[in-house]
Amino acid sequence: MPSPSQDPSADAPSPGPELLGTRLRLLLSLLDDGVAAVHDHLGLEGVRPRYVPALRALAADGPSSIQELAAATAVTHSAASQTVAQLVREGLVTVGPGRDGRRRIASLTARAESLLPVLDAEWRATAAAAAAFEAELSFPLSELIGEALEALRRRPMHKRILDAAPLPTRHGR
């Protein structure tokens, strides 16, 4: 892959809001790939960046339900459930029934606990790097993301799209 200075599209004007989702996915990919490269450097085999918030929440709070993990990591229940399933496959978490039998409770494995000192150090380094990255921007990205999420909670994107222009349905109505 060419470096940004060799990339002919690097000098192209930035697309407008019509490619917002595409550009956000690219940004997320660049951020996650950077953290994943650090994980590789540290020998954290099988630990993806998306796992670390859940592992840290379990370390801090102890065994937790999927719902509790979702709240602690600010993701949907579905996303937390998928992450826990992946953590189980990687041998980082076990899942068992809760006291009432209706909830599944995730717990760290000994392997995950042994990785916590390295993960905590990586977390602190990543937070420092993120703060330095934001300092290069004209507006802190973390604040902008918060504002964007709040705006979409007030009025979801599908409503914004449908209000922007009348759209034909599959049946031409």
Image (cartoon, helix red, strand yellow):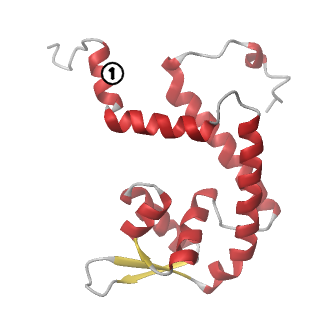
Mark 1: which secondary structure? helix
Residue designated by label 1? 161
Q: Residue at x 33, y 21 (%)?
A: 161
Q: Residue at x 75, y 37 (%)?
A: 135
Picture coordinates of residue 159 (x, y %)? 28, 27
Residue 112 as seen in the image, left or right of residue 76: right
Q: Is residue 74 visible?
A: yes
Q: Is 160 rendered above or below residue 24?
A: above
Residue 60 as seen in the image, left or right of residue 6: left
Q: Is residue 44 visible?
A: no
The one nearer the camera, 74 or 78, is 74
Give the position of the C terminus as an image quadrant.
top left
Q: Is 40 rendered above or below residue 149?
A: below
Q: How many marks?
A: 1
Q: Residue at x 26, y 84 (%)?
A: 101
Residue 84 as seen in the image, left or right of residue 160: right
Query: Quarter-wise, where is residue 51 in the image?
Result: bottom right
Q: Residue at x 77, y 14 (%)?
A: 11
Q: Is 47 rendered above or below residue 23?
A: below
Picture coordinates of residue 4 (x, y %)? 81, 27
Give the position of the N terminus as an image quadrant.
top right
Picture coordinates of residue 44 (x, y %)? 73, 68
Picture coordinates of residue 100 (x, y %)? 25, 85
| Amino acid on which the number 1 mark rests in the picture | Ile
Q: Is 129 rendered above or below residue 163?
A: below
Q: Residues within 10 Å of mark 1 (few under 14, many from 20)?
A: few
Query: Quarter-wise, where is residue 103 in the image?
Result: bottom left
